[in-house]
Amino acid sequence: MPVDELDSRLLVTMRAHPRIGLTELARLLGVARGTVQARVEKLTARGVIADFGPTVTPEGVGYPILAFVSLQIAQGRLAEAVQALEALPEILEVYGTSGQADLLCRVVARSTPDLQEIIARILTSPAVQRTDTTIALSVQVPYRIEPLLRAAPDRGDPSR
């Protein structure tokens, strides 16, 4: 379900001011506080708003190395591989993919020797056949959602 213009403005404003209260948000948007509260509740229930917690950076807590590790998994052993990956705190995300790799992992490390150890731990799982690692050297376009939010109301509902 797409977002409308008010939802878009609400989300962009919340992202720009993460600690803003509902009353101030309503004032900035020029709508009633009850409207803002209802919209926030609706967006949360729909899964558009995922959380209200602080964004914590891995480098801020001592993990400055970011790598993307693709894995080839033994036939029929996906669940076993995922379970092994869940046990490693340095693995932030894992996606099932198409193409050469079966899984793509976002991994952080304290140093390159630490990254090598993490990869060695990944490979201890008999479910993992092969890894391929790419280390991120810099962030060219950081995670962003605001351009998408601003464009969403203009695109309308694609199912119509």
Image: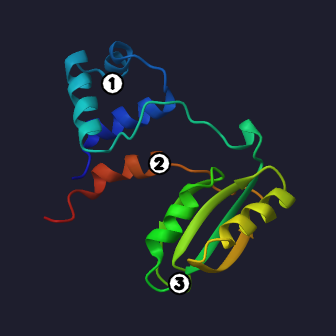
Q: How is the image coloured?
A: rainbow
- N-terminal of the pair, mark 2 or mark 1, is 1
Alpha carbons under labels 2 and 1: distance apart: 19 Å
Give the numbered dot on residue 139.
Answer: none
Count of all numbered marks drawn on residues in the image = 3
Classify residue 51 as left or right of residue 137.
left
Classify residue 78 as left or right of residue 30.
right
How far across and how far down the image is residue 49, in percent?
Answer: 36, 39
Residue nearest the observer in this picture, 116 or 35: 116
On the image, numbered disc 3 is attached to which residue?
74
How far across and how far down the image is residue 57, in percent?
Answer: 66, 40
Q: Amino acid at mark 2?
A: Ile
Label 1 vs label 3, nearer the camera: 3
Q: Are the residues at dot 1 and dot 3 in contact (C-beta closer than 8 Å)? A: no
Q: Secondary structure at mark 3?
A: loop
Give the numbered dot on residue 145.
Answer: 2
Alpha carbons under labels 3 and 2: distance apart: 35 Å
Q: Amino acid at mark 1?
A: Leu
How far across and how far down the image is residue 40, in percent?
Answer: 28, 30
Q: Residue at x 24, y 44 (%)?
A: 46
Q: Secondary structure at mark 1?
A: helix
Q: In this picture, is 122 found above or below 3? A: below
Residue 111, picture quadrant: bottom right
On the image, numbered disc 1 is attached to which residue?
29
Number of other residues with Cα within 10 Å of mark 2, as a class: few under 14, some 14 to 19, many 20 or more: few
Q: Amino acid at mark 3?
A: Ala
Q: Residue at x 29, y 20 (%)?
A: 30
Q: Residue at x 33, y 40 (%)?
A: 8
Q: Secondary structure at mark 2?
A: loop
Alpha carbons under labels 1 and 3: distance apart: 53 Å
- N-terminal of the pair, mark 3 or mark 2, is 3
Number of other residues with Cα within 10 Å of mark 1, as a class: few under 14, some 14 to 19, many 20 or more: some
